[in-house]
Image (tube, rainbow, N blue to C red):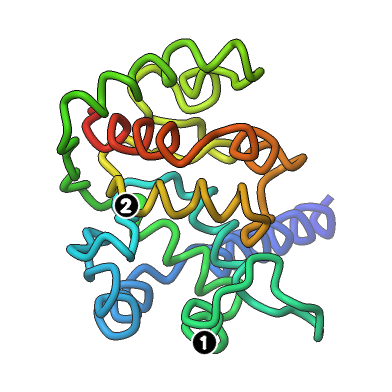
Amino acid sequence: MIKRSLLLSLLLVAGGLHAQDQSPDLAKAKQTAETICAGCHGADGNSVVPVNPKIADQHEEYLYKQLREFKSWDGKPAVRENPVMGAMVAGLEDADMKALAVHFSSQQLQPAAATNAETAKRGQDIWRAGIAAKGVPACAGCHGPAGAGLPAQYPRIAGQFAEYTEAQLKAFRDGVRKNDPNLMMQTIALKMTDVEIKAVSDYAAGLR
């Protein structure tokens, strides 16, 4: 009985230490954000330049997935090819990426805004109902009515720079970006014109 109790105690201690080892190092993540990430995204994830996305309040799971896919692992090409981000994540380990995802997901978003009422109205129609004639589904079906997305599956795009969302949709359409599950975004974007992509991107920027 004594031996069994001692063994159980050791297992509980070991389990506790393991859990501690797995906890994200948020202090290190904050330092990384302030030194490496801040130049493009801001230390709190609120980029001020449309070419760089706002990542504050983005889903932790989505951020972690993107960080991992920017990096080459075991000599294999990165799933999401981007020379700038590839260089930024080259020195990060898996634990660093998890911690950064936690850090940025906990920051408050300073949202962008829609800039063209006419364009945004067209975008609203696509967001809510899709484009039936082309088989384009409603954006709200995956990203939600308010653009909040769904953790681990669909990113939050409400308040994102319209220019960035537009660039990503075109990248999916042109086969430049290929890290969407089941080619979902590539298939959808392929059916959309520049005007339609611009409209829905502008509308999403104004969502809250």
54 or 178: nearer the eye?
178
> Is there a contact, CB below 8 Å, between mark 2 and mark 1?
no
| 57 in relation to 12, above or below | above
Locate residue 174: give its quadrant: bottom right
Return the residue at label 2: 163
Residue type of the residue flagged with mark 1: Ala
155 or 202: nearer the eye?
202
Residue type of the residue flagged with mark 2: Glu
Mark 1: give few (<14), some (14-19) or many (20+) Cα within 10 Å: few
Q: Residue at x 54, y 82 (%)?
A: 83
Return the residue at label 1: 87
95 or 11: nearer the eye?
95
Q: Say whether residue 113 is left or right of residue 124.
A: left
> Distance between the Cα atoms at labels 2 and 1?
23 Å
Spot occupied by residue 48 in the image (x, y as percentages of width and height): 17, 63
Circle 1 sits in a helix, a strand or a loop, which is it?
A: helix
Q: Residue at x 52, y 63 (%)?
A: 98
Q: Residue at x 36, y 78 (%)?
A: 28
Spot occupied by residue 192 in the image (x, y as percentages of width and height): 55, 33
| 31 in relation to 148, above or below | below
Spot occupied by residue 25 in the image (x, y as percentages of width and height): 42, 71
Q: Say whether residue 52 is left or right of residue 90.
A: left
Q: Say whether residue 28 is left or right of residue 169.
A: left
Q: Residue at x 59, y 19 (%)?
A: 137
